[in-house]
Amino acid sequence: MSRRYTLLEACSETGVQRGYAVHCLRAHWVSPAFPEESTLDESDLARLRLIATLQEDFGVNDEAVPVILHLLDQIYGNKKNPSLARRV
């Protein structure tokens, strides 16, 4: 069973401010692995770190974040299921 993090624990682990994490959740850039419990898992924390890096280090604006995340989701989805890549 993977570790579950509250929002405050996730912020502490990732180094992002609470308001920024809430913004990412409200924008649906991060979807909690356990929404019924309002907790995040390791993959949620990794996504939160990625978004923060994209915006802070690379200057990506809010409009571009969902485009980049969608493309990355497609790439990693194809790596997990190569038969999907052959159909495209």
Image (cartoon, rainbow, N blue to C red):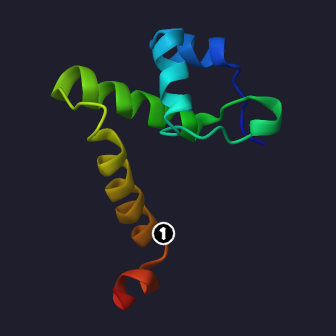
Q: Residue furthest bottom?
A: 87
Q: Which residue occupies the foreground of this view, 28 or 55?
A: 28
Q: In this picture, is 46 found above or below 69?
A: above
Q: Residue furthest left?
A: 58
Q: Quadrant of the N terminus?
A: top right
Q: Quadrant of the C terminus?
A: bottom left
Q: Which residue occupies the foreground of this view, 27 or 36?
A: 27
Q: In this picture, is 4 found above or below 67?
A: above
Q: To which quarter of the image does residue 34 belong? A: top right
Q: Disc count in the image?
A: 1
Q: Residues within 10 Å of mark 1 (few under 14, many from 20)?
A: few
Q: To which quarter of the image does residue 73 belong? A: bottom left
Q: Which residue is under mark 1?
A: 80
What type is the residue that disc 1 sits on? Answer: Lys
Residue at point 68% right, 42% down? 33
Residue at point 35% right, 54% down? 72
Q: Judge left or right: residue 23 versus residue 34.
A: left
Instruction: Classify mark 1: helix, strand or loop.
Output: helix
Q: In this picture, is 57 found above or below 29?
A: above
Q: Judge left or right: residue 56 versus residue 7.
A: left
Measuring from the top left, give residue 69's x and y in whole percent: 37, 48
Q: Judge left or right: residue 75 versus residue 61.
A: right
Measuring from the top left, give residue 13's x and y in whole percent: 54, 16
Measuring from the top left, give residue 85's x and y in whole percent: 36, 81
Residue at point 35% right, 89% down? 86
Q: Which residue occupies the foreground of this view, 31 or 57?
A: 31
Q: Judge left or right: residue 15 versus residue 61.
A: right
